[in-house]
Image: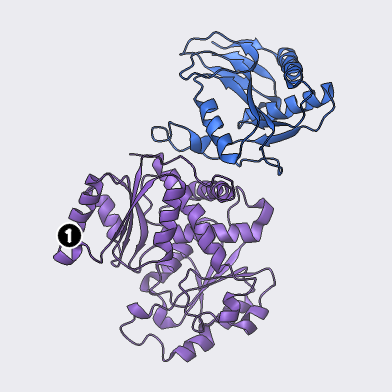
Chain colours: A blue, B purple
Amino acid sequence: MTRVVLTKPDIDRALKRIAHEIVESQRGRFGLIFLGIPTRGVHLARRLARLVADIEPQDVQVGTLDVTMYRDDLATQSTRATVATEIPSSGVDGSTVILVDDVLFSGRTARAALDAITALGRPDVVRFAVLVDRGHRELPIRADFVGKNLPTSTSERVNVSIAEVDDLDEVSIA
Amino acid sequence: MKHLISARGLEATPTVAILDTAMDMVDVRTREVKKLPTLRGKTVANVFFEDSTRTRLSFEAAALALSADVTTFTTQGSSVSKGESLKDTLQTLEAMGADFIVLRHPHSGVASTVVNSGWVDAHIINAGDGTHEHPTQALLDAFTMRSRLRGENARGSNLAGISVVIVGDIFHSRVARSNALLLRTLGATVTLAAPQTLLPREIDSWGAAIVSTLDEAIDLQPDVVMTLRVQRERMTSGFFPSESEFTQLWGMNDSRLRRLPPTSIVMHPGPMNRGLEISGSVADSPQSTVTEQVANGVAVRMAVLYTLMGDSR
């Protein structure tokens, strides 16, 4: 049975709030780089970047961070396709990186992402924004900005649909 | 895919995926930290029963770039000279922890024998078996063609519409066989140019057109001219009258290069016999991809190691 937990207006509001929280935490320090984790994190990163720039006009950069080769389950999972990592030409050194993903679950993707960032350079600060935090962490990792805390059981599936990929904005549990 | 033995078994979709992964590996090579942790704790054994410079170094560089441990075995100074069998050598290496065995052997078919025998559990990568196949060379050549000729649009694409001429010592060339098979799978058109004596008997199964001189092949205005090394060490009898006649009919030189479209490329898998199958000035021209092929080799082999890693069956 599928249950819709976030509709398009819910997602819009959540992203708007996160954007405000990011601007607030910035305290006037510019040089934000949003790095989305493929696939859906990339589109959420673009949306957040736009929202942040609307709230406080500034030069915001967006990139893609592929974490596939940094995962810790490669030997046990079948091969995943890699995606191009795209970093602003100025690099990440000295910037504030906002890592963006759709769902935070075990925390293993975020762990891999932190390693991937380290290989690219040394940002001043790395923050983590997710649309949905569904719990069940396996590592000591938490998100700085959360769209919606969603209590789930491990047997449930959280499906995030994003208009850019799936033609509609929706979060459901199955 | 657990092993990579032959270009014959490769299908188009997984091949394009390997080439796409290789693009991301090229990108990694330009980063501040040029290593990935992907194969940490895994061991790659390079087992070379035949001389090699670039393939062995390339596999070593690829394994190291993925944080694997690397052991290299060459027949010189080994127990092979005491008569140790291939089976015992490979089982010894696996007992020492090899997860991948990169195998080069002077006899055709050895890599598939090893896979079918069940002697070892490790992933087997064929790095050249006799005059049979050299699949990673074909992958890196396909990668080089795709990036040179497609540029920005390379990702996700196959080689449909690209015409390739393979010229020279096709009989002894595992590179030619692997390339002809893989290029056809990827949708390219392949034409072979060689003296009758240097064409293998089962050439009909390659699905390639055959012309008898390089000049005829150049008239087709191909996108790629792939020259091959004349393998003097494998030539026991007279395959062609003289080296100067070979150069005249099948050697890539300046005047033939000028007759090609300016966007066409000239490839060579190395090591080159400058002045025999390719002239020095062609090898050093901007249309030559010789050094690019070497650089791409590392990225493509990284992609191959990564792709095989995910399949332990």
The reply to whether residue B172 is in sight is yes
Q: Which of B189 and A114 is in front in this view?
A: A114
Q: Which of B102 and A159 is in front in this view?
A: B102
> In the rendering, at what x and y percent does residue A27 appear?
77, 20
Determine the residue positioned at 45% across, 38% down.
A79
Residue position marked by numbered label 1 in the rendering: B85
> In the rendering, at what x and y percent does residue A148 appear?
64, 12
Q: Nearer the viewer, residue B56 or A168?
A: B56
Q: In this view, does B75 lie above or below A158?
A: below
> In the rendering, at what x and y percent does residue B289 appear?
58, 67
The reply to whether residue B189 is in sight is no
Determine the residue positioned at 14% across, 64% down.
B83
Quarter occupied by the N terminus of chain B: top left
Q: In this view, does A63 lie above or below B298?
A: above
Q: Which amino acid does label 1 sit on?
A: Ser
Left or right: where B162 falls relative to B49:
right
